[in-house]
Amino acid sequence: MIHNTLEVSNLNTSFFTEQGEVKVLRDVSIVVGEGQVVGIVGESGCGKSMLARSIMGLVRKPGKITSGSILLDGKELTTLSKKELCAIRGKEMSMVFQEPMTSLNPTMRIGKQVQEVIAIHDDLGKQEARLRALEILSTVGIPEVEARYNAYPHELSGGMRQRVMIAMAMVLHPRLLIADEPTTALDATVETQIIDLLKRLTNVGTSVLIISHNLGVIAQVADFLYVLYAGRVVEWADVYELFDNPLHPYTQGLLDAVSSLRSQSKSLKTIRGTVPNLAEPYEGCSFTPRCDKCALWCATKAPELAIVSPNHEVSCHMVERDDDL
Amino acid sequence: MAEDERELVASSNANERSSSLLRRLSKDHKLSVASLVVILLFALAAVFAPVLTPYDYDAISLSDRLAPPSFEHLLGTDEGGRDVLTRLLYGSRVSLMVGIVPTMLSMVVGTLVGMTSGFFGGKVDTVVMRVADIVMSFPSMLLAMVVMYTLGGGTANVFLTMVCVGWAGVARVVRAETLRLKQNEYIEAARIVGVRRLRIMLRHILPNCLPTIVVLFTLEIPSSILTESSLSFLGMGVQPPSASWGLMVSTGREFLYHAPWLCFVPCVAIMIIVLAFNYLGDGLRDVLDPHLRGR
Amino acid sequence: MSEALLEARDLVKEFPLRRKRRVHAVGGVSLSVREGETLAIVGESGCGKSTLGRMLVGALAPTSGEVRFRGQTITGLKERELFQFRRQLQLVFQDPYASLDPRMRVRELIGEPLVAHKMCDSKDELTLRVLSLVEAVGLPTDCLKRYPHEFSGGQRQRIGIARAIALDPSLIVCDEPVSALDVSVQNQILNLLAELQEEWGLAYVFISHDLSVVRHVSDRICVMFLGKVMEVGPTEEVFGEARHPYTQLLLDSMLPLDPRMRDRKRRTLEGEPPSPVDPPSGCVFRTRCPYATKLCANEEPSLRLKGNVKVACHHLNG
């Protein structure tokens, strides 16, 4: 029986604006098993950042989690108080953001910032905390740790700063690490190093939820993959299965687009149209206006996630399912 | 907020392009709307003063001196037997005029100076800003008093003084805004396309500065009103028998024990109008900024 | 054959810092672009490619060196003299959010270049021109009265492209034009740029850090590192056999779309990224290069021709 680090079930998050309720996440269910790396793929407007924030309990007005459950190691997060969430954040689950420069305090030395995380949650003495900080900074690959300990963020390169962020997120050995576009702001040569680092985190017992719009990154690091579109999960599968056999027209479109870029074809494959405006609710499948494979009823009824094969579920009316066969 | 969240809120707000400033103010800033109403009432009262009161502001009636509020004189009479309410209404003309006109002039002068200085930079900018610094480092009242002393009293001179004193603060703020806006990529984009610098200043910088300028305007007005009140209080502003709130406070000081309403009434009036402009400014600032998405 | 449309010679750009230090953003770059071709400038952050792009269109004055357009020198010209060249050289920006004035409507944004160069006699003619540009970039014709924030990132980028082609330029520098866009939208914009190039006879200088994009769009590619050119030549040849160690590294860093290739052997960088304030002596890449020798520290390698490709490396068989 695989123990799940994170279980998100039927999560609904909305923004309450002057126009009314805007549903940013609709019935989203995600599972991150122990020691797994799970990827969330989606483009802008799909809700992936909101998913990360919902899990971390960082959704602020006018946003709100309207229903659903989030279980971290079996503990329900949606009913916790602010104080209880603060105690968990950084210790049992933590997050790494896209822009390491703006996430780090520019006026504080990096060693101290890592120590600060320890100080908030544990009662270690100053010396011990320093040792722990040094240890984690070394583990994430900061060279000459003793010397770098007193550096300021602006004295480090982008890749180094991201490593510091990861160190801060990992110092208390959380059960879950959420990485929101961790390599998007980094150069390609550094990206590969950070991806390797993220992969190694599972060796110390941390499960990773990585969010990215970059399929290449996900392909390199994830065990399972969820595709998000307009606030819904449209497909999820084991990573090898998904890249071999994408079933949802959106997933197929994405993969086609990226691979046509790498092929020698003159005209690039695109997905016509644009991402829908979530403020305008849609009865049927949100992808319909851009879909080449849709039928009449796709516009009237939203499809459900259905099992296609073990470790592969799709939310599409036009895909044959296991139970149909 | 993350980028896609901002997009979300902005795109749903974008659908109400037709929504007026007033409507947006009234949704979340009821205090601002109330303030606006108060200001309008004062303005109307100032304009229709002759209609609202049967008395003349300078009608001396020694037999009626220092009468407490009554049916005939709603706010009592002052040391010359003049109706306080009447003087208050006529005085509001002066106070509002002095609040608005010199502030407008200060804004115009300050904006011109600050924007040009910030946009073109260089030696001119340095010199202009040093001058502004000097003007600002003098206590404004002292400077005002010096100017008034040299030029003599009277409304026109009060106006002039206040513009001399007020432009520097505006110039500083507008210059800072200009410097910030200059960094924007769309300014570089306009230059690359071949737009001349003057046109960039007028077409790109000025409109984007406008929210700041408008808000600054509403916040400077109470400052001007207070300056005028202080000047008149010190005997350097409006001269008797003209009415001005500051003057009323000044003369009312002597009778604080016997006829407290003489001092109290104009003080409260000043306080209300200053607060009203402040709240209006606050509300405008909140409402004008999110219209420009992202910041 | 065709002479160079745009030529840059020994362009250097240094930004002063406090205490007499300087940022050596671009350290002596020469290149040329022919009519109708696409030259890609590739490199990672801090390599100076954006600075170089700005110097090529005359938006930034170089510290030294010159830029020639159709044989005429455009560097060192006064604003008034540079004005006429602006019609020929344009720029598409990376950030579709920041490069459009949020207070201007689309009609004014696209019309601005036309007005600045007095290309239309009447208001109606202006509107007509703007409409045809809007159609050319694939935007709906009712967009003229709307503001930038009402559009998506891809659509805003189209507005930016419409502005750039409004003056019918000969060359457009595209500074990371698709980096801020989603993948599906990226391809739309790349297709658009290719169409426009064919229909309007444009030359592009395409600046990007994304090698897969670059391979697709460019005829020739120029690889930069810390302000200097490492390798330059026909795209297919450079991709087919990268000669410079840095180019090899960049190609290796392209993430494959196949999860089965996740444990493939990869070249890695040595050491720390060097600082443009204090660049290494000799070859600027040597502190990260696995093949660096004493020679590399003492002498800066010049660009030498190897077949059709120019490479700046002392150890060309490494």
Image: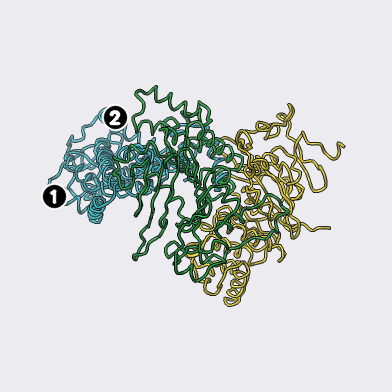
Chain colours: A yellow, B cyan, C green
Please give the residue where the numbered disc 1 appears in the rendered image.
B149
Chain of residue at mark 2: B
Q: Could you tell me if residue A232 is visible in this image?
A: yes
Same chain, marks 2 and 1?
Answer: yes
On what subunit does the disc labeled 1 rest? B
Position in image of residue B11 (x %, y %) = 54, 37
Could you say which quadrant of the image residue B133 lies in? Answer: bottom left
- Could you say whether the residue bearing mark 2 is in a helix, strand or loop? helix
Q: Earlier in the sequence, mark 2 or mark 1?
A: 2
- Mark 2 lies on residue: B52
Give C311 or A63, whichever is nearer the viewer.
C311
Left/right placement of residue A87 relative to residue B252 reads right
- Which residue occupies the foreground of this view, A212 or A120? A212
Instruction: Classify mark 2: residues with Cα within 10 Å, few (<14), some (14-19) or many (20+).
Output: few
The disc at residue C43 is none
Residue closest to the eye, C232 or A271: C232
Quick check: A285 left or right of A145? right
Residue A128 as seen in the image, left or right of residue B228: right
Q: Position of residue B269 (x, y in %)?
A: 32, 42
- Mark 2–mark 1 Cα distance, whole angstroms, equals 36 Å
Q: Quadrant of residue A208?
A: bottom right
The residue sitting at 60% across, 67% down in the picture is A141
The residue at the point 55 percent across, 65 percent down is C289
| Vertical side of C262 occupied by B62: above or below | above
Can you name the residue that lies furthest to the right here? A325
Q: Amino acid at mark 2?
A: Leu
Query: Horizontal placement of C36 versus A275: left or right?
Result: left
Measured as percent of width and height from the top left, residue B50 is found at: 25, 29
The percent coordinates of residue B53 (x first, y second) are 27, 30
